[in-house]
Amino acid sequence: MSPRVALRYSLRELRGSLGRVWVWVSCLSVGVGAVVSVAGLASSVDGAIRGEARKLLAADLAVRSRSPIPEHVLETIDGVPGAVRAEVREMAAMVGRASPRAASPGEAGGEGPSSLLAELKAVSGGYPFYGELVTEPPLPAGTTPADVLGDHSALVSPEALSRLGLEVGDDLRLGGRTLRIIASLEGEPDRLPTGFAFGPRVVVGVAAQEAARIFPFAGFGGYRVLVRLPGEHSLEELELRANALRGDMDDIAALRVETYADAQPGIREDLERLSRYLGLVALLSLLVGGVGVAQGIRAWLTQRLDALAVLKCLGARPRDLMRTYLVQAVLLGLAAGVIGGVAGLLSILLVPAILGGALPVEAVSIWQPWAFVRGVALGIGVSTAFSAPALLVVLRAPPVRVFRSGAEPLPGSRLASALSVFAVGAGVAGSTALQAGSLWLALRFMGAVVAAVVALILAALALRRLARFLAPRCRSSWLRYGVAALARPESGTLAASVALGMGLMVLLAMFVVQGHLHDELAAGLPDEAPSAFLLNVPATGWRDLAGLLERQGAERVQSAPVVMARVRAIDGIPVAERLNERNRWALRRQLRLTFLDELPADNVILEASGPATASRPWVDPALGEVSVEQDFAETIGVSVGSTIDLEVGGRETRITVTSLRRVDWEGFGINFFLVVEPAVLDWAPHTRLAAAWLPKEREQRIQDEIYVAYPGVAVVRIREVLQKVVDLVGNLQVGVRVLGSFTVTAALLTLAGAVAASSARRGREAALLKTIGSTRFDVLRAFAAEYALVGLSAAVVAAVLGSAAAWWLVTRELELAWSFRPWAVFGALAAGSLLSLATGLLASVGALQRPPIDSLREAR
């Protein structure tokens, strides 16, 4: 049979079975749509970042650091012919009204806060070199923000204006400075409105920031030098220039040189990581759809045994028939890929609305050809691979069936069966590898899927055995029939149970993990935890500030000195020679460390060079001792006896690790990776970090009092931070739940396909039951019992597997306390039964309405 004839015959077959084909195509389309929407969204956002890369960096090159850029680095940049530079500093800072309000929210006569924590950006030079600050009213044409702002003006976001009750033209207080608000800040070219933010945005000039004596606190800001080069430069030329700058900098471990191609690296890395995991969740719905296609094709070919026998008698070879039906599988995959791909691309437009504004509308675009091609390829691949076992029916069709309709199928070939299983495995492995982008992640995903499928198959087989045992013992005829129907070899319950179980398992695991995350974040603070942290507290003013806190009703007030330092060498080896992917974040940053006589109460010494305890941690002050948190010690590669060379205030200091300790970070206490013996660093310039528990109803009032007395102190209220994290996690979980619902939808379509594939047989059975005296309601109850039991059995296994998966994620990945969620399990059981019942009955409408006379005529 030539390929042309095979194609014509395939199209003719599909035309004659459109009533069944739509179910199979729908099964796959749902999965393809999920895959394309995830890949398309990730590609869209990444493309938006790349398309506006220069604007998002606001320069050709940038040098980034957590600490002030050294002068020699600035001189190196100034030595580049024609280069122009600008500086950007970002930090958390308190801003407020120049004239405080009489009271704060929740108090008599209160109208709103007088102060708030903001994200402050200080700019100088020609920032931004590309793009522009969007303000209302616009800044004068031909000027830069730094020129307009000087040391006396500010741009303030609408959120900050609203919360403080200010308008353009009013005064804003920053530190000890009063600034005039000259415009509302509507947008920044180098900032995407995604991710976590401590507070609303405020932009000032570097001169105003320095005059206010507000500086970045470690972990809450950083420094950037932006560089514009003369003329037009290709990316390759910029990379060469960036490499030259890196070579001229002896402090490269602490600095990061970027070109515009590296703009927004954090967002892009998070996006890639998130798209991988969400892509695997989407792939699961596609695999479930593949189960539906395999089941549908198998049932269809079983009904076509007579036609296959005729074709064999007419000379068609088994391989010709295999090729013909394989073409049909490819065409089904192609149709599903196109339909699902288009739907997936269109669904991208809904994402900004679903995420509640967390993603700007302009960041998404439905023109994502690579995502569409990937979806179509996956649709064809999954359809072809999963149909391979079903196509074995073609080989087993006996030609003698033309003369004897009851002839049994031919015995199957073990080699053909093995090859078909290999085809399915190869299809799943290839699809997973394409989606995961990581061999380790792909192997973990495949292992989990295989384990879940095996468990679901065993449960379905156990259900058959149980049904065979219970059916004769059921007193009601309708219940006896419904239970017995589960035990039939060609009932379709096996594939339906696997598909529905997979969908419910994913959805249940997501809901349970979400519940633990939400409870952990929404529960707020432990009873003994502080509710606020105070940053940049001047060392000389701590006693007065502590007194203010106590007078205002604060409890459990504590503080510790904070010294900023940079690691230069470990065990005599320079940091630049020890950098790797694991320790880069720790060794390139400016570290906060402290010096204390005693370790905090929630610290436990695990290993020490002498008889050290938390109350007496120092065994030999002559060594210059330091106690290191155990995980941080493992990250940077130190142990008891190691030496660490620090640069503190321009001075080199060597300290020796004499103990490792465990820290209870969940207690929200004041803790540090490095705690040094006081005599080593008591000379170093330092500020203090303070923490206190504030009465909830007086938090804003106390914050305003602190701001009036100490405007340079930043107050971080933990309840507000936790709520922002809850909102951010909630946005992400919405997307995950939507993808989980895709899997359940594909599973329900698989069940509908199983029912539709056996509609002729079910119609005959319904007609025969009516003929021997059963009412339509009895037949309806029999079908309902079968579908409800299929859903219930799948839900029971899904509840076990989903709870196990959730337990692993909660306890091992998120490291949270586990609690059993009975409402989630009961919800899965009810959802499985009801959804299966509703889907099965809807797909059985035709069979239930079939007149008995039709079956009697067919029997003749």
Image (cartoon, grey):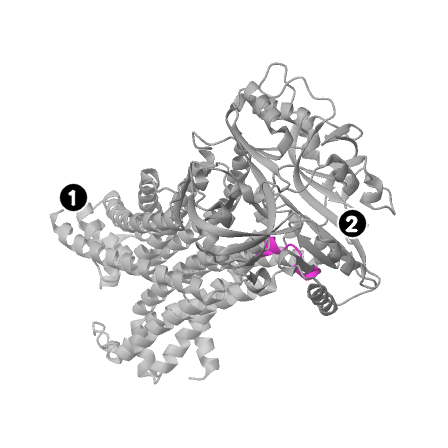
Name the residue carrying label 1.
476
First to last magenta residue range: 259-269
Q: Pick the quarter of the image with the C terminus.
A: bottom left
Cβ–Cβ under 8 Å for marks 2 and 1: no
Residue 740 lies left or right of residue 262; in this view the side is left
Look at label 1 and name its amino acid. Answer: Ser
Give the x, y percent position of residue 858.
Answer: 26, 62
Report the front residue among 751 and 15: 751
In which quadrant is the N terminus drawn?
A: bottom left
Q: Which mark is residue 194?
A: none
The location of residue 470, given as percent across then percent down, is 14, 50
Q: Nearer the viewer, mark 2 or mark 1?
A: 2
Q: Position of residue 133 (x, y in %)?
A: 76, 45
Pick whichever, 532 or 451, lies toward us.
532
Q: Residue furthest front?
A: 622
In the image, is 25 to the left or to the right of 148?
A: left
The tag earlier along the polypeptide, 2 or 1, is 2
| Res. 112 image quadrant | top right
Q: Position of residue 740 (x, y in %)?
A: 43, 50
Q: Verify whether residue 267 appears in magenta.
A: yes
| Frontmost residue, 843 versus 346 | 346
